[in-house]
Amino acid sequence: MTKEYPSIFGHNNDNQSRFLAEPMTDAKRRFCDEMDVLVFRDGARIVGVMMGHPVDWSTYYWRTIALLPEMQERRIATRVLELTDAPLRAAGVARLEGECLPGNLRMVKMLTGQGYLVTSTVASERFGVLLRLTKFLVPEARAVFDRQFSSMSFVNPQPSRRLS
């Protein structure tokens, strides 16, 4: 993937990334060694990668889903995400999370089509502003989200009393 990285992650003509590039360090390698990595091949050629890891005991985070430009629009990532829901749910995962650029309409459309909801935004010098998307794998987790963040109840306040 190192060879194909610029074409996947949007380097400009000077091979400069729009993101903060960080060299491979021992700490970064240890972090990556702990991730689940799915490699997509077309014959012997690597054409994509998907990496994820648990956030906690009931949340799984898709860190990267990337395909070469010519492999996009083939529903590869969509099908793989569909196939991972059941095993992750069986392992006790209640929610899946991922982040993408708001302008990455292809990814936003794919994830929302899979049932992911935009649950927050995050901003950093590393990636800029990102949308956080969450897919709830168990109805109880979705119900709590809806109750806490989507449902609003309006209480008719008591008329104010004037103090004399």
Image: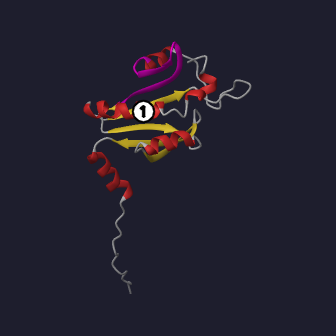
Q: Quadrant of the N terminus?
A: top right
Residue 80 in sight in this render: yes
The main secondary structure of the magenta stretch is strand
Quadrant of res 106:
top right
Task: State the residue in front, 48 or 132.
Answer: 48
Q: Is residue 141 left or right of residue 31?
A: left
Q: What residue do we see at 30% from left, 46% from top? A: 141
Furthest-right residue in this view: 14
Q: Quadrant of the C terminus?
A: bottom left
**Residue 105 appears at what percent x and percent y?**
56, 43
Q: Three-letter amino acid code at disc 1?
A: Arg
Q: Which residue is mark 1?
A: 79
**Residue 97 appears at what percent x and percent y?**
41, 38
| Within-10-Å neighbours for mark 1: few <14, some 14–19, many 20+ | few
Give the residues in magenta: 33-55
Residue 131 in sight in this render: no
**Residue 159 appears at what percent x and percent y?**
36, 81
